[in-house]
Image (spheres, helix red, strand yellow):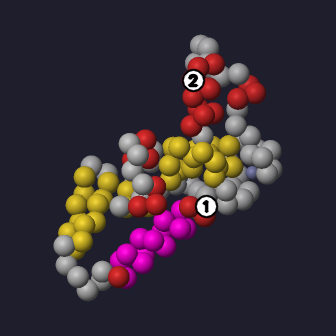
Amino acid sequence: MVTTNVDHCFQKTGFDKKRLFYMQGDYGLFQCSKSCCDKTYDNESVVKEMFYKQSNMKIPSELIPICPVCGEPMTMNLRIDNKFVQDKGWYDACGRYERFLRRHKNTKNLFLELGAATIRLLL
Ligand SMILES: [Zn+2]
């Protein structure tokens, strides 16, 4: 499935990540704000810790996510500017989708768009 949703909801429901191409990024991942490398980091445990330790809408300074490569702050992995990181998982998902399209290019297909998500079904 191809989705432009970035809310990480497919993964939270248990949808197999290997069947999902989250082309515009994912709120469930951090990346370096300077995009110094092509790595992303699952952020669920850090975000939960931020939630539980917040006070007056602020988190403790030590919880501000820092890039382990360059030391700059981390940000969400979202395609909002030219610093979007397409990590190995992104390229793997893109490749799986491209192979699917090539495999079925001469078959009848139905595209369903549900909200902001597009689902392609093989008929
Ligand atoms: Zn960095």
Q: Is residue 81 above or below residue 55?
A: below
Residue 81 found in image quarter: bottom right
Give the farthest residue toward the right. 70
Q: Where in the figure is residue 22, as x and y percent of width and height?
A: 45, 57
Q: Residue 51 shows which numbered tag?
A: 2
Q: Is residue 76 above or below residue 96?
A: above
Q: Residue 34, can we see it?
A: yes
Q: Residue 7, can we see it?
A: no
Q: Is residue 116 above or below residue 123?
A: above
For the stretch drawn in magenta, the main secondary structure is: helix
Q: Is residue 43 left or right of residue 63?
A: left
Q: Residue 87 shows which numbered tag?
A: 1
Kindly identify the residue that appears in the image at 50 percent across and 49 percent down.
Answer: 26
Distance Cα–Cα, label 1 vs label 2: 26 Å
Residue density around tag 1, few if under 14, some if 14–19, many if 20 or more, within 10 Å: some
CB at disc 1 and ligand 1 closer than 8 Å: no
Mark 2 and mark 1 in contact (Cβ < 8 Å)?
Answer: no
Give the farthest residue toward the bottom. 106
Q: Where in the figure is residue 102, as x and y percent of width and height?
A: 37, 82
Q: Where in the figure is residue 82, as x and y percent of width and height?
A: 59, 59
Residue density around tag 2, few if under 14, some if 14–19, many if 20 or more, within 10 Å: few
Span colored in magenta: 90-102
Q: Earlier in the sequence, mark 1 or mark 2?
A: 2
